[in-house]
Amino acid sequence: MKAFARNNALSLAFFLLFLLAVAGQVYFGLKEYNQELADNGMLPANLGNYLSSGHFLQATFENWESEFLQMALFVVLTIFLIQKGSSESKDPDKKEEVDRKPDPKRTGAPWPVRRGGWVLVLYKHSLTIALLGLFAVSCCLHFSGSLRDENVQRVSKGKPALDASGYLLEPRFWFESFQNWQSEFLSVFAIVILSVYLRQIGSPQSKPVDAPNNETGE
């Protein structure tokens, strides 16, 4: 167990933080949702109802959607684009390990590399495929939750409910998406630029403290 915890400490720490954040979101989200229902003269929701409500689904998946979009674009754009001096960029003046041809005879090579063919073709792009898939699923769930929440509010005000095609023409879903996307793009811009000039000793996301500003890559 000690070896497992040491070897997976980073993922375990972030997963624990994720669970704590979800618990906080659910606790306070349920309170806010029930306050909204009370203000509209509706009965309060229990935990089970809340977890399937548009209020929870919209708030959760609009954030997941933007995170996976940001990561997918970052993975793809760093293949072709560089930022001189950034620890987040490939160095244009040298050959990078990530660009070399997969060697099926390399010790510990994953099964798709040894298998070759179409399996290897998919595996070479599997990270991007997975991130774009997660983005697509999150986007659909965000849209579904946002539509549900919008219709709850409309019905409480005596307005007709919207169908999916009608809601696509409304500004709310697009506002929710773009307000999250812009923050994700800004955060990537910040780490790319700040890592040129600033350092954090001990972090693999930073260049060595004594590295020149124009040295590119970690």
Image (cartoon, rainbow, N blue to C red):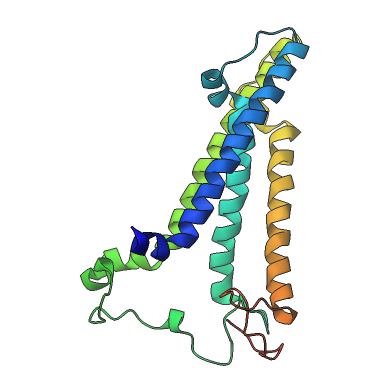
Q: Is residue 217 above or below residue 32?
A: below
Q: Position of residue 152 (x, y in %)?
A: 66, 17
Q: Position of residue 103 (x, y in %)?
A: 29, 81
User: Where residue 6 sits in the image (x, y, percent)?
Assistant: 41, 64
Q: Which quadrant holds the C terminus?
A: bottom right
The relative height of residue 216 versus residue 183 in the rendered view (above or below) is below
Query: Taking the image as drawn, is residue 142 in sight?
Result: no
* Residue appearing at x 40%, y 59% in the figure: 5
The quadrant of the picture occupied by the N terminus is: bottom left
Q: Is residue 162 above or below residue 114?
A: above
What residue do we see at 51% from left, 20% from top? 48
Left or right side of 208 for 125: left
> Exactly how many numbered labels are in the figure?
0
Residue drawn 53% across and 54% down?
Answer: 14
Residue 87 seen in the figure: yes
Please state if 147 lies on the left or on the right of 41 as rendered: left
Residue 200: give x, y in percent of width and height. Answer: 66, 76
